[in-house]
Every structure is written in C-alpha cells, then in structure tokens.
DNA sequence: ATCGCTAAGTTGATTCGTTGCACTTTTCTT
DNA sequence: AAGAAAAGTGCAACGAATCAACTTAGCGAT
C-alpha cells in the first residue's frame, strides 16, 4: 500500500492516472489488447492521448500498473528477514507465501489470460522482472557484505527473478518453486526418469 | 557457417538479404540506431521498405543477423557430447570455448558498444536468448530421458541462457562463466567478503 | 487576497515502424 | 515455351509515440 498523496494537485493527478489505468484495463479485457487503441483509452478516460503518455511510459505499461509493489516486497523479504535465516530461505518462503496465492486469485484469472495470450505483454512482463535484477542483487550483496556488482549475487537475483516465467502455467506452482530453489540450493542434477504415462 | 544456397533464386534472395543487413549495420554504426530509419536502410540497400520487412521481422532483427548459429551450436554441444561427459560439463566447456573469444574479437567491439548503448537492442538481445529456452531444454530433456517440459530441464536451460546477460561487461568473462556454472553445479552460497579496496 | 510560478492537460501536427494491397518482374518447373 | 510460384515494388494507411505552443488549475509567499 502506498502513502496517500497530500496536496489536492497530487490527488487529482493520481485520480487521472487511475482513471486511465482503469479504462485501459477494462477495454483490454473486453476487446483484447490489440483491438484497443490509445485513443480509445484516452476517450474512455476523458483525457487526451498526450496525457496518457505523461502518466505511462507506453501502451504495455498500462497493463502493469501496480506490480512494482511485489518487487519492493521481495527486497524487504531479504533485508528484514529473521536473524539466522539464510537469504535463500527468506526468498523461498516469501515467494511461496505471496506469489502463488496472488496468481491463483479468481479475479486474476482473466488478467492472466490477457497477458498470456498477448505476445507483446508476455515479453514486457518477463522483462519487467529481470529489470529488477539490479535492486534485488544490491540487497543481497548488502546482506552478505560484498560489492553491489558481485557476480554471485547478481546471478542469484537473476535466477530468482526467472521464477515467475518458469513457474507460469505449471499445475502445481508451489512444487515448481520448491524444485527451482532446490536447484539453486544444492545444484542441478539430472532428474530421474518419470514413469511413462 | 551455413550451407550455400542452391538455386539462383535462393542466391539472389540471400544476396539482397545480405545487402540489407550490411547497409543497416553500417548506418547504425555510423549514426546510431535511433538516428537511422527503415527508409534510410532501404534506400542504401536499393530496395523498398516492404522488402526489408520481407527479410527481417523488425528493425531490431536487422542487427542480429547470424546469432542463431550460436543457438544451434549450443544444442549440438549438448546432444553430441562425448559419452560419459555430464550435461553441465558439456555446456560449460562449449561456452568457454566459443562465447568469450567471439565477444572479445576486436571487430566486435563497436558492435557490442552499439548494442549496449541502445536500450531497445539490449532488450531484444536478452529476449533473443531466453527465447531459445524451449529448444535447449528439449535437448537437455531428451538426453536425460524425461518429458520435454520437465521443470528442472527448463530451469537449467533458462539459467544457462542467462549467462550472456550476466557475463556482459565483466573484466574476466571466463572466470564469470566458471563462477556461474559453479552455482549451477553445487548450489549458491554467500560469497566471502572481499578485502576493501 | 492576490500575484506569479509551476505542473497538468490540451490540441494538432509530425515522425516512424509496420502492414496490406494490387501490381510487375524474375526464376523455377515441366 | 507456358504457366506457376516467389521476390520485389509502390503507395497508402494505421497506430504508437513525440513535440511545440498554448490554456488551465493549484501552490506558496508576500
């Protein structure tokens, strides 16, 4: 939850931003991403197209309005973990706690479908996560006490941020997360043969 | 190296494609990616803009003309590895053999700078690699004898394909590759503190 | 209270990547 | 040599995004 804006100006600004995001999401869900133009969104929100781009960096960003909170939460999970808990455990538990329940929420079903069925949105979502590599790896490096650009920390951050893409579409997301963390903790081994179905 | 085309038609097709790619790269290096339009490239290659898009899926693809060979080589390294060699070793040795020498080649310096200094190209390059996840993970799964969508194999493929992005800009690329494979082999551990400079 | 300053929003034009369509030219097949 | 298939052309058009000049509304300090 973000701090509520103070001045009237800020409130109005936030209001228009919200109006644009709401209008966009509704239209996207109704007609599909590619069947909605920026002008449609601007008209629905009763603003000009230029205003849309003042608030959002591009069309894709209209869809992912609040997913930045998940990044802050992830970093907080590392920085404020209980003493004695390893970084890997903190990440694992936090992810198990929050991500699957978010994505399994019934309201999110059509949203997930929208993203999955639109290639440009899939691409944007993936890049959105890996773009957070810098801040997450900085947090990890701080906790360990090494330079921010320490390779092991950057790599771990990157691998952890790959998890949403890897776990997407799995029947049992929790098991998927556990399996990936097992690789990160103990190293990769050839999986045993599965019984043929 | 790809097999030379057979018929005259194929040769001409390859020639125009090459002319477009050459013109594009030269202009990009001269003026910078954003300062060159598709129409400039088409004029320089003496074709119409429509022809450019017949050969390349988009503007970014003009820059990465031959990087697909590296993917095939990577998969071959897994499939045709010496018997008794582990998959991880095969990947590690192949990458150490080929990638750093390619990127340290002097001719590639300005190309690398072009990509690094153009955000949209950086993004495309990253996505280009992770897009190969499917074929690499399929190769790994085949060698291990499990389903193509086995999570551990997909995860390994993804992590290995993250390596270019992680090793980019490191002073010692070989050491970086080794360090990342160490994580993938034995699991992640907090790195020891470095001596303060 | 009000006077400017700043930031939000508008309007309209403009650039640029990309696609579609109807058409011509070249090459392959038989 | 005829006709099918594919490469390329020319042009118009669409949508996303940006820019410049302008209007409006809220803010802060006198």
Image (spheres, coloured by chain):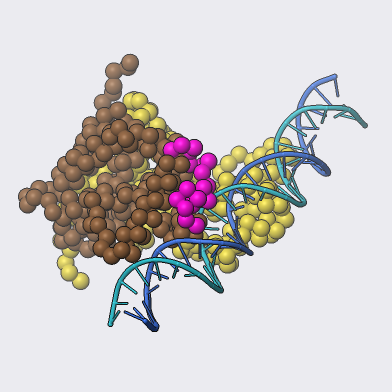
Chain colours: A yellow, B brown, C cyan, D blue
Say which of B192 and A92 sits in front: B192
Q: Quick check: is B34 in the magenta stretch?
A: yes
Q: Could you tell me which residue is drawn at 24 percent across and 54 percent down?
A: B2
Percent position (x, y) of residue A142? 38, 28
Q: Is residue B92 left or right of residue A18?
A: left
Q: Could you tell me which residue is drawn at 69 percent across and 37 percent down?
A: A6
Q: Could you tell me which residue is drawn at 69 percent across and 59 percent down?
A: A44
Q: Is residue C26 left or right of residue C7?
A: left
Percent position (x, y) of residue B22? 39, 46
Percent position (x, y) of residue A128? 46, 46
Say which of B23 and C16 sits in front: B23
The answer to whether any part of residue A97 appears in the image is no
Q: Could you tell me which residue is drawn at 45 percent across and 41 percent down?
A: B28
Q: Is the stretch drawn in magenta largely helix, strand or loop?
A: helix
Q: Quadrant of residue B137?
A: bottom left
Q: Report the label total.
A: 0
Q: Is residue A49 left or right of residue A87?
A: right
Q: Quick check: is A68 in the magenta stretch?
A: no
Q: Which residues are magenta?
A: B29-48
The answer to whether any part of residue A146 appears in the image is yes
Say which of B83 and B42 sits in front: B42
Q: Residue furthest left?
A: B84
The quadrant of the picture occupied by the C terminus of chain B is top left
Q: Quadrant of residue B181?
A: top left
Percent position (x, y) of residue A162? 36, 48
């Amino acid at each position: 939850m973000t701090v509520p804006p103070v001045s009237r100006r800020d409130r109005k600004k936030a209001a228009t931003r919200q109006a644009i995001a709401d209008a966009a999401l509704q239209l996207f869900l109704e007609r599909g991403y590619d069947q909605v133009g920026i002008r449609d969104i601007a008209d629905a929100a009763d603003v000009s197209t230029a205003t849309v781009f003042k608030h959002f960096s591009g069309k894709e960003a209209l869809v992912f309005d609040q997913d930045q909170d998940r990044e802050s939460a992830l970093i907080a999970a590392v920085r404020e973990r209980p003493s004695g808990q390893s970084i890997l455990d903190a990440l694992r538990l936090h992810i198990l706690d929050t991500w699957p329940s978010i994505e399994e929420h019934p309201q999110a079903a059509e949203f997930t479908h929208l993203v999955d069925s639109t290639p440009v949105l899939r691409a944007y979502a993936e890049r959105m996560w890996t773009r957070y590599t810098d801040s997450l790896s900085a947090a990890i490096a701080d906790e360990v006490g090494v330079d921010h650009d320490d390779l092991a920390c950057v790599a771990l951050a990157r691998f952890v941020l790959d998890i949403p893409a890897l776990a997407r579409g799995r029947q049992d997301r929790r098991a998927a997360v556990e399996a990936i963390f097992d690789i990160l903790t103990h190293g990769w081994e050839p999986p045993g043969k599965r019984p043929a179905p």
